[in-house]
Amino acid sequence: MNSSGFILIDSHFKPVYANAESIKILGYPNTENSSDPQLLDGLLAQKILSFLPGDFSSIRNACSLQFMSGKRSYHCRAFIMGDHWNGGVRESRIGLLMERGLPGPPSGARRNRYFAGMHEDPFSFIANPRFYHFSRVHQNVYKSLRNMVIEGRGLGVLFAQSGMGKTALINYLSENLRHQSEIAVFPGSFVDRAELVRSVMAILGVEGIGRELHENLQLFEKWLISKYRDGRRVILLCDEAQELNLETLDNLCLFSRLGMGQQKLVQIVLSGRQELLAKLTQSGRDWNGESINRYCRLVPLDEGEVGSYVLHRLRIAGCTRQLFSSAALSTIALYSRGIPLNINMICRHCLSLASSINVPMIEERMVADSAYDLVLRAQPVDVWNDSDGFINSNPPQARGRLRDRHGLRIVPKP
């Protein structure tokens, strides 16, 4: 059991018992500063809900699951544990036994990695800051969010459709600010404000946390002021923020209002898809007033940026020769529609084919075949109205537009 994680939760998915390994697995990367399960109960419950069916306690059956924590895959066996010794009301518990997954590498992964002298996968789906490529819009958005944090403006929001590189940009921002900041990765929604405050304080390593909300808020504000006087910024990063409930968003906005004069003590970056915009702009909320300082948006890459993106990642991976022809790069832009995730999918498939049949250079036809295999078509997609990321204090209304048949030029909806 030393290398396995075991956690016992009640019917509301709240931890009752957890060994040290289970806290490391479920709390990663937020357990560096605290390993007390009583303070991390909200974080652990959020992670469990991300892979365990919400109605598992009513199913009364055992099941086997797979989930990811960081870059590692884990195998989880979940089962009901009945209380047979309590003479009063019997309450069932759910036991989770977690072990490190041992799947082999994907077929051809090693061959792809050493193809053309490359020492690692250039088109991995893991958001690695080393491979981050700045398009014009990505650079403008990064600078805007970074300046907002450095200037202590409080709360910024990043929007983008799925696969546009939000997570990669957030990771890059985190890596570049880590040496001068206290950074916490925000895990998800919480039941109430007390649980949220307690969990955030535990992530940041605040000592002396109690159970009373008022006392914790006073302690947290004193801790923030001490960090401010030491020149350390406190940053909360939340990816996939469209999944947050309205109560959690309300409480985050209250965090962003803590300040010393014009300087905010907590800098918050929310990153999410368009559903987040709908939550923030709904009637009856004041988030768009003094709370949110910056709105930014990522848009698809144009044809030239797609070529630069592919060549940049190949160069970082150690590629020693030209792998894609100019026509192939243009075809990648066509079928990917400028979305980085689609670009990675097509390029990985092309490298696998090229290494399998020993083709020295990837041409246009191979890219088209790969896009066909991946069910990617040069078809219209909905995007937001302008071609640049909006960077201001008021979000524009999302008006639909369509890509033309080549997937690159934006044209109005008929």
Image (cartoon, helix red, strand yellow):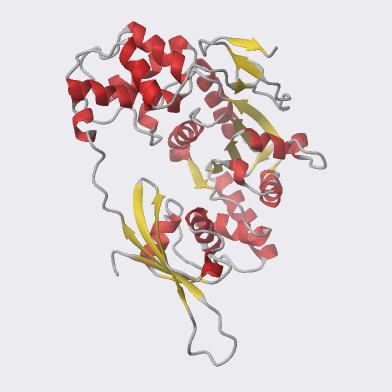
Query: What residue is rendered at 45% in x and 56% in y?
Result: 27
The total of numbered circles placed on residues is 0
Picture coordinates of residue 174, whole percent (x, y): 47, 37
Residue 151 visible in the picture: no
Specify the quadrant of the image occupied by residue 264.
Answer: top right
Q: Nearer the viewer, residue 179 or 28?
A: 28
- Residue 414 vs 166, above or below: the answer is above
- Residue 255 vs 15, above or below: the answer is above
Q: Nearer the viewer, residue 211 or 207?
A: 211
Q: Indicate the quadrant containing the C terminus: top left, top right, bottom left or bottom right.
A: top right
Left or right relative to 84: residue 193: right
Query: What residue is rendered at 64% in x and 62% in y?
Result: 216
Picture coordinates of residue 256, whole percent (x, y): 67, 43
Picture coordinates of residue 262, whole percent (x, y): 70, 36
Q: Nearer the viewer, residue 311 or 75?
A: 75
Left or right relative to 331: residue 221: right
Residue 281 visible in the picture: yes
Query: What residue is rendered at 46% in x and 10% in y?
Result: 303
